[in-house]
Every structure is written in structure tokens, then in C-alpha cells.
Image (cartoon, helix red, strand yellow):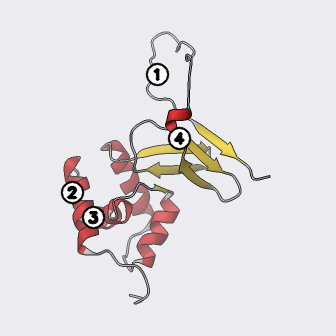
């Protein structure tokens, strides 16, 4: 392992394992590593599978990209992450799971939280018969002038 690469300390590992336990997710080695990288410092994150894979590699952990994708999907299914699809080719995974809007920065391809208190809907269109609204995703695309 590169001595300058970030490592997962005991506090981050403990936070990650507690996060998995709250959702009843079995903490395999790979899940524990990825959980520690996602929530180990207590801050919310917006990651892509590729950026999480790179963070794992940079910390000296051996995890395949396919495992990262499968683990992110399992975390979403367990209610630990929210998937935010920006376009048909790019998904971000958000550790903050309550409904909230996002800014998508087109120049850097970064997703950040937008201030929810400033967002107002007067009403939504009625869903088609036999359906219900499951969630409303708000992604505000930004371009620098």
C-alpha cells in the first residue's frame, strides 16, 4: 500500500459498520470498506461508482469495479443510499436519503445539495390512473458564465 494514500481508520470503520448494522446489511469485507469510505467521516457524499472505486484503490483496498456497482445497488435496496440519475449515462449515489434538491455542475460533473428551503412546488401533475408518486427528483443543472 502507498504510504501517502488515505487509509480507513478505526473510527471510520466503526461508523461504516454501524451504518450497515442500522439497515441490517451483512458487513462483508468489501461492504465494510465501501461503507467506511462513504460515511466514515460523518459527512454526506455524492459519489459515482467510479469515484468510489478510485477512493477504495487510493486507500489501498482491493475491490473490483463490479463489486462497487453491486454494493452500491445493495446499499440503495437497503435504504442506505439514494440514487440520483443526472442523465441516461450517469448516476450518483447520495448518503443523504431524505428528499432534497440537487445542483448538477455541468462543467465539473459534480452533484451537490441545493437549499431545500428555497424550493417551492404549488402542485404536481396527477399521476396516471393506477399509479402513485413515489418520489420527486429535482436536479438543477448549472453552467458557469
Q: Earlier in the sequence, mark 1 or mark 4?
A: 4
Q: Quadrant of residue 56?
A: bottom left
Tag 3 residue: 32
Q: Residue furthest front?
A: 117
Specify few, some or many for label 2: CA neighbours under 10 Å numbering under 14, 14-19, or 20 or more: some
Q: Quadrant of residue 126?
A: top right
Q: Are marks 1 and 2 in contact (CB under 8 Å)?
A: no
Query: Which numbered disc, 2 or 3, marks the residue closer to the eye?
Result: 2
Which residue appears at 46% of the width and 51% of the height? 93
Q: Nearer the viewer, residue 66 or 34?
A: 34
Specify few, some or many for label 3: CA neighbours under 10 Å numbering under 14, 14-19, or 20 or more: many
Which residue appears at 45% of the width and 11% of the height? 130
Q: Earlier in the sequence, mark 2 or mark 4?
A: 2
For residue 18, the mark is 2
Tag 1 residue: 133
Identify whether 106 is placed above or below 56: above
Is 123 on the left-hand or right-hand side of 105?
A: left
Could you tell me how far apart the alpha carbons at marks 1 and 2 are, in whole angstroms? Answer: 31 Å
Query: Which numbered disc, 4 or 3, marks the residue closer to the eye?
Result: 4
Which residue appears at 55% of the width and 16% of the height? 123
- In terms of secondary structure, where does tag 4 sit? loop
Q: How many marks?
A: 4
Q: Are marks 2 and 3 in contact (CB under 8 Å)?
A: no
Specify few, some or many for label 4: CA neighbours under 10 Å numbering under 14, 14-19, or 20 or more: few
Is 128 on the left-hand or right-hand side of 73?
A: right
Specify few, some or many for label 1: CA neighbours under 10 Å numbering under 14, 14-19, or 20 or more: few
Q: Residue furthest bottom?
A: 3
Amino acid at each position: 500500500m502507498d504510504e501517502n494514500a488515505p487509509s480507513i481508520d478505526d473510527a471510520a470503520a466503526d461508523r461504516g459498520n454501524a451504518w450497515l448494522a442500522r439497515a441490517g446489511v451483512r458487513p462483508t469485507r468489501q461492504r465494510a470498506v465501501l461503507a467506511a469510505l462513504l460515511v466514515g467521516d460523518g459527512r454526506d457524499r455524492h459519489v459515482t461508482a467510479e469515484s468510489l472505486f478510485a477512493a477504495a484503490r487510493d486507500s489501498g483496498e482491493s475491490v473490483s469495479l463490479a463489486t462497487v456497482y453491486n454494493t452500491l445497488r445493495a446499499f440503495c435496496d437497503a435504504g442506505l443510499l439514494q440514487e440520483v440519475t443526472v442523465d441516461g449515462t450517469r448516476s450518483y449515489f447520495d448518503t443523504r436519503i431524505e428528499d432534497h434538491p440537487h445542483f448538477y455542475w455541468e462543467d465539473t460533473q459534480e452533484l451537490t445539495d441545493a437549499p431545500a428551503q428555497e424550493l417551492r412546488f404549488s402542485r404536481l401533475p396527477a399521476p396516471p390512473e393506477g399509479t402513485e408518486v413515489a418520489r420527486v427528483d429535482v436536479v438543477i443543472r448549472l453552467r458557469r458564465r
